[in-house]
Image (spheres, rainbow, N blue to C red):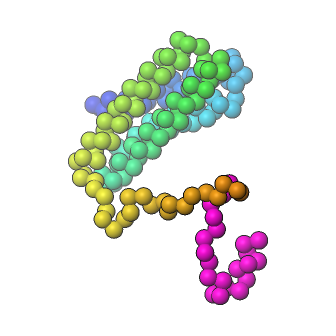
């Protein structure tokens, strides 16, 4: 284990618990699909934390920890689904969820502190809302087609059909 890195240590311990949980769900509960998703996301948390430790820059560090946080969120989802479906018993679920929630709290705190330390501020040339404000057409359930200059490409009508 990496010395004096609580987050790295906890992520390794959690990954080991995910391996054991995955084996249990496969062998004892015959659950193959959701358990594999939980296994993948649950072990990915630590892998990305360890990548962050070797990051090439503070931005790279922040990116890897943000990915870890997303993977932790996905793992939380799968744990809840498996518990509500009756596949994980209450005691096992609560124990895993507590460990995961602690990792999530540490990740959030570390990400927040890192952002403050590198003074991430919005770029004045970039709109705070990068998505255009297009309301969907309620008649067909999709966003309207943008206006396209058909004179520059006579085959445009064929490609849109």
Q: Judge whether residue 2 can be spotted in this image.
A: no
Residue 109: x, y in percent? 31, 36
Residue placed most toward the observer, 38 or 94: 94
* Rendered-image quadrant of the N terminus: top left
Please identify the residue farthest to the top as the structure is shown: 91
Q: Is residue 69 magenta?
A: no
- Give the residue at x 42% y 58%: 129
Q: Residue at x 55, y 31 (%)?
A: 77
Q: 133 or 104, which lies in front?
A: 133
> Image quadrant for the C terminus?
bottom right
Q: Is residue 9 above or below residue 94?
A: below
**Percent position of residue 128, x then y:** 38, 58
Residue 154 percent location from the top left of the image: 71, 86
- State whether residue 127 is above or below residue 48: below
Chain part drawn in magenta: 141-161
Pick the residue in front: 156 or 50. Answer: 156
Res 86 quadrant in image: top right
| Residue displayed at 47% across by 34% down | 72
Residue 147 covered by magenta stretch: yes
Per the picture, the main secondary structure of the magenta-coloured stretch is loop
Left or right: 38 as drawn, with respect to 104 = right
């Amino acid at each position: 284990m990496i010395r004096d890195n609580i987050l790295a240590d906890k992520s390794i311990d959690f990954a080991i618990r995910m391996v054991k949980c995955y084996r249990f769900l496969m062998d004892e509960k015959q659950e193959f699909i959701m358990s594999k998703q939980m296994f993948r996301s649950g072990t990915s948390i630590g892998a990305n934390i360890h990548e962050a430790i070797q990051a090439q820059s503070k931005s790279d560090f922040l990116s890897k920890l943000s990915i870890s946080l997303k993977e932790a969120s996905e793992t939380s989802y799968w744990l809840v689904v498996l518990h509500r479906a009756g596949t994980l018993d209450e005691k096992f679920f609560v124990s895993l969820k507590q460990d995961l929630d602690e990792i999530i709290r540490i990740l959030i705190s570390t990400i927040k502190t890192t952002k403050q330390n590198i003074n991430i501020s919005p770029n004045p040339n970039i709109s705070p809302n990068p998505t255009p404000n297009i309301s969907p057409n309620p008649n067909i359930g999709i966003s309207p087609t943008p206006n396209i200059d058909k004179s520059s490409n006579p085959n445009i009508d064929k490609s849109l059909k």
